[in-house]
Amino acid sequence: MSISKIGIAPRSALICGLMLFIAGAGFGCEGRPKVQAEVEQPEIIPPKLVHEGGVEQLQLQHNSLPDMVLVTIRELALPGVLETTGQITFDDRRVANIISRVTGRIEQIYVSQWDYVRRGQPIARLYSPDFMTAEAEYLQARASAPTLAAGGSENNEFARSMVEAARRKLELIGIEPEQIERIKSAVPFFTMRAPISGNVVQNQALRGSAVNPGDILYSLGTLEDVWITGDIYEVDLARVHVGQGLQAVTTAYPDEIFHGTIARISPNIDPNTHTLQIRCAVKNPGFKLKPQMLAQVSIAVRPGLALIVPLDALVFETDSYFAYVDVGHDRIERHKVIISSWSQRGYARVVSGLNPGDRVVTGSTMQVNELWHEAHGERS
């Protein structure tokens, strides 16, 4: 018994000593745990709107959005070819409306929709007493002219003016000069002829229908030369001019190239898209190009420069794109940006709103957009 008690006592003392050592290492004099010194974090200032020279800016520390990256807008070389998509239309200088110039009735029609007609070809026959009256006046003026002319120079001049007035009346109701020369008797029927060669693109003439002066019966258009109307961006205006050569390709004839030139450049620019229209005169052998077709137009131009922006730097709202530009001193401006397509995936061409060297926000663009609206008291 005594031996056992003697052996246990030293072990108990050793254990108690170890426990006191461990406790002393983890606690201070007051018995509380020691806390390691904390690393001081920089104070984050909440985003807010400030005004600089009348421009709104968002005061935003870059370290408040760890994923925010600034990318510098750069210019890239443009190729010597400008491409646009255009729509084929009739050359309006080669389109003619055939109208009725008298009151009457359509007795016969000789052509129909999409028919090709040649200049002078009969297209319709009208019945109208107006024709008979005008022809009768003309024939009477011609018949009485020799008698009047025998009465002297004044009578001769009067006779000549009567014939010319009657002839002029026939011309005004649509009778061609060569048709006037063939008039032998007054009849109420008149054959209308095509004033140009072309296709019947509109047909309003129906057999037996009544007509009045000004009614359009046919519209003719020629397809020998057509127009292709396309849009180009304002930034490319200095690269094109009237007379510039071009090539056009259609999906209907992908292996055939149609040649033409720029015939007109619109004087007006669309303020919403910053584009303007060009009108290209294109040769149409075989009449293959049809109105309303789409064509890809390639214009040889001098090389230029294009401003490029990453797509993830843009935010689309309502009907516009916006980018956030770093202006230094932890301030960001919101710019409205007009863009166009670009050949490199993930990028767009800047038409307006940004300048070379601007540093735009990427990576956290949507978060910055939300902060901008929150600073305005809005919800993005």
Image (cartoon, grey):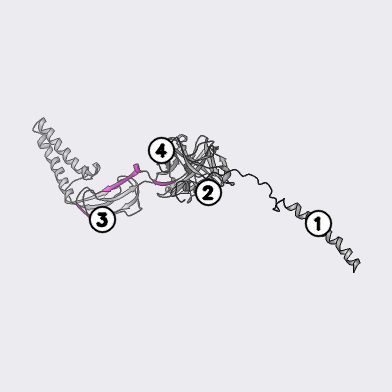
Q: How far is disc 2 from disc 4 in space, using C-alphas?
A: 48 Å
Q: Quadrant of the N terminus?
A: bottom right
Label 1: element kind: helix
Q: Residue at x 89, y 64 (%)?
A: 6
Looking at this view, name the residue that lies furthest to the front.
2
Classify mark 1: residues with Cα within 10 Å, few (<14), some (14-19) or many (20+).
few
Give the number of the disc on residue 18.
1
Q: Percent x, y for residue 249? A: 48, 46
Q: Percent x, y for residue 259? A: 46, 41
Q: Residue at x 46, y 37 (%)?
A: 235
Q: How far is disc 1 from disc 4 in space, using C-alphas?
A: 102 Å
Q: How far is disc 2 from disc 1 in space, using C-alphas?
A: 56 Å
Q: Residue at x 39, y 46 (%)?
A: 89
Q: Earlier in the sequence, mark 3 or mark 2?
A: 3
Q: Percent x, y for residue 50? A: 47, 40
Give the number of the disc on residue 367.
2
From where the camera sits, is residue 11 visible?
yes
Q: Earlier in the sequence, mark 2 or mark 1?
A: 1
Looking at this view, name the residue that lies furthest to the bottom.
1
Give the number of the disc on residue 263.
4
